Image (cartoon, rainbow, N blue to C red):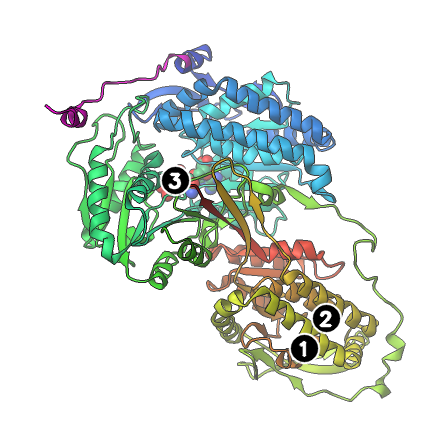
Amino acid sequence: MTLTEIMETLPYGPAPEAAKPALDWLKAHKGRFQLFVAGKWRNPASKEWFTTINPANAQKLAEVAQASAADVDEAVKAARKAFAGWSQTKGHVRARYLYAMARQIQKHARLFAVLETLDNGKPIRETRDIDIPLVARHFYYHAGWAQLMESELPGYAPLGVVGQIIPWNFPLLMLAWKVAPALAMGNTVVLKPAEFTPLTALLFAEICQNIGLPPGVVNIITGDGKTGAALVEHPGVDKIAFTGSTEVGRIIRKATAGSGKKLSLELGGKSPFVVFEDADLDSAVEGVVDAIWFNQGQVCCAGSRLLVQEGIAEKMYAKLRARMEKLRVGDPLDKAVDIGAIIAPVQLQKIQQLVQKGVEEGAKLWQPSWAVPTEGCFYPPTLFTEVAPASTIAQEEIFGPVLAALTFRTPEEAVRLANNTRYGLAASIWSEDINLALDVATQIKAGTVWINSTNLFDAASGFGGYRESGFGREGGKEGLWEYVKKIEVHNTAQGQKPRARGLTARASAESLPPIDRTAKLFIGGKQVRPDSGYSKAVYAPDGRLVGEVGLGNRKDIRNAVEAARSAQEGWRKTAAHSKAQILYFLAENLSERAEEFARRLSEQTGQDGGAEVEAALEALFTAAAWADKYEGLVHPTPLRNVTLAIPEPIGVMGILCPDDQPLLALARLAGSALAMGNTLVVVPSPLAPLSATDFYQVLETSDVPAGTFNIVTGERDELARTLAEHDDVDAVWYAGPQAGWALVEKASAGNMKRTWTLPSSGPLPDTEEILRQATQVKNIWVPYGA
Ligand code: NAI
Ligand code: MG
């Protein structure tokens, strides 16, 4: 026997991590856990308990309280009471507590790791080397933001009580992602762990006790989806942060619609793993192992679609099969095991059914020659080749160790395939050509893109989705905005022009033309008549008719969205400098016609039109100024890489304008959205639409590309509904009455579009906030090293 032969045939001996410390901890609690509310342990009002098992051997680990609506209420009350003090606590003091949490987690790292592996079934290698270290890192990192909040987020305040609902795939890590930023920013929390994996959250509750965290700042309530729903619906909650399935995310979007609760959703994915022919194939194969067999593939950002360039596909598959043959599935506490147990029988069945479907739909299945343990919930690593792009296994999240491989010929085709999904959580790109890799990275619609790497996470980098993968970011500075709100200042000090008064008299009937021509809609760069054939009268505050506008309907909105979609790619790619030039040109042309606009404004609003035109010009200048200055960040993630946090346009946006200062609102909202690279369907205020319709004449003379800026007049809520329901619209900003907020938020759940609701009158948000709403951050990880 040669040495090589010996090495290749050497069997693995068992290398078990002892379960005893964790089992002792369970025993010390007599295998039963209450709810952690107001710093104390209490029985559930429901008197109900459920069991959590070890999926690797189906044995019961403990009984856990099922929190009812009454318990949720107690927890929210405790968090509310604690908020009064916690929100006033100095940043430095909050930083001390977060630091203490990080230290405690490190000190008990092995207990946490073993407990997590027992409860979840993931390999000890992962809990020990990835989950728990990242948890500690998250608390350290956010201790820093607590310290810096005052100086780095001036003018922002905590939201209040935050309800947090997390899944079972990274139980403690998701807790850290939620709790750390919330506490850092001065909020108090009620957190519900997933019913399959409550134990590490309960151990974390003990840490909160041990470090003397003020009672009620963190409350942990265990339970299933019913408990989650009660938390979502509780009127005393100011924000819901959720990670889990897109299906439940949609329910939560609808349930919170119109409630004023802030919402962030981190949902499913079907992330592409793109391998170009010049990639380092051996590295790429290791990448695939990490992408889809990490945590049994139960990862929202799992690289579950392998896209390989045609010329190297067979070679890549051969290497992959050889590697899969060597993977080890089994006891998660064994330190030499790569793939542990699937969380529960229900998930195992889901995987089996989807694999069956893949076979039925004609894809070619490959699994290693060895068998997985029959006791417990195990599934072998699985490779599908010859997968059709539209097939179920290429489109649906399997959430298991199953990879679907497709081939492409050109980079353009790779981008098209990568984006052929309703999700947009992450992507991984493999090429030795950095030009190609970065070019493709900017074109893939996903919140995180890893170049020549995959599944890298760090507290300093934001994580979150595009499209139906949800909205909001966790981690990085971008993640902090989810847990703060602007402090309302009730004076005019924040750059808001005071509302001018007393000019109604000047707009006398004699100085006006009797009735204006009917303003048309502006779609795809052309003035068009409304599909309905109807017009709508516009009156002055004193009841005089000042003009008419077209009554737009669903069809007009659809046409406008189509125009905006066609223009989107071109406008997005237009150089920032050119976008700025066009915005300046818009201002210049508006200024040419300042008097005419001022008169129109005075007629419609009875206010000083001249001052508003001036303010609108200034707003366009501000938007132009930001077009090439709204910068991203480079996050210092602790690896040899740069992580580029780049604000990107959201895409096609519907903007329903407020009633006050109609021209200024148009300039500030639409101008900023345009500056960031979005294309727009603008619905002017129904009370004062004429300034917007006049504005299309300015657009026509300012080199604004056709379809970039569309204007549809009509009934606000009717048009808002159509926009919010439209699957090709990526965001809707709605300024209008509260009833409309609920309508827009609910209707947006279809494709999980971003929504932003504003009052119909009163001061406009400042530009900084508008720019943030007009963008979403993509984090591109670029490792380096020769
Ligand atoms: P799920 O979305 O039902 O569970 C996630 C969390 O939401 C749990 O804490 C659960 O108790 C809670 N929940 C359930 N229904 C709720 C409701 N109506 N209101 C409020 N909270 C509610 O996910 P589940 O059923 O465990 O897994 C189903 C599928 O979801 C998986 O096969 C996978 O495809 C996907 N999933 C995605 C995750 C991700 O990180 N993107 C995480 C977990 C599951
Ligand atoms: Mg369990």
| Label 3 – label 2 distance at C-alpha | 47 Å
Foreground residue, 562 or 348? 562
> Regarding mark 1 in the picture, which secondary structure is present there?
helix
In the rendered image, which quarter is residue 487 located in? top right
Sequence-wise, which precedes: disc 3 or disc 1?
3
For the residue with label 3, is its CB less than 8 Å from the closest atom of ligand 1? Answer: yes
Q: Which residues are magenta?
A: 1-21
| Label 3 – label 1 distance at C-alpha | 48 Å
Residue at 78% x, 67% y is: 615
Q: Which residue is mark 3?
A: 299
Q: Which mark is residue 663?
A: 2
Residue at 72% x, 67% y is: 621
Sequence-wise, which precedes: disc 1 or disc 2?
2
> In this orientation, does residue 509 appear?
yes
| Label 1 – label 2 distance at C-alpha | 9 Å
In the rendered image, which quarter is residue 697 located in? bottom right
Position above or below: 759 against 302: below
Q: Which residue is mark 1?
A: 695
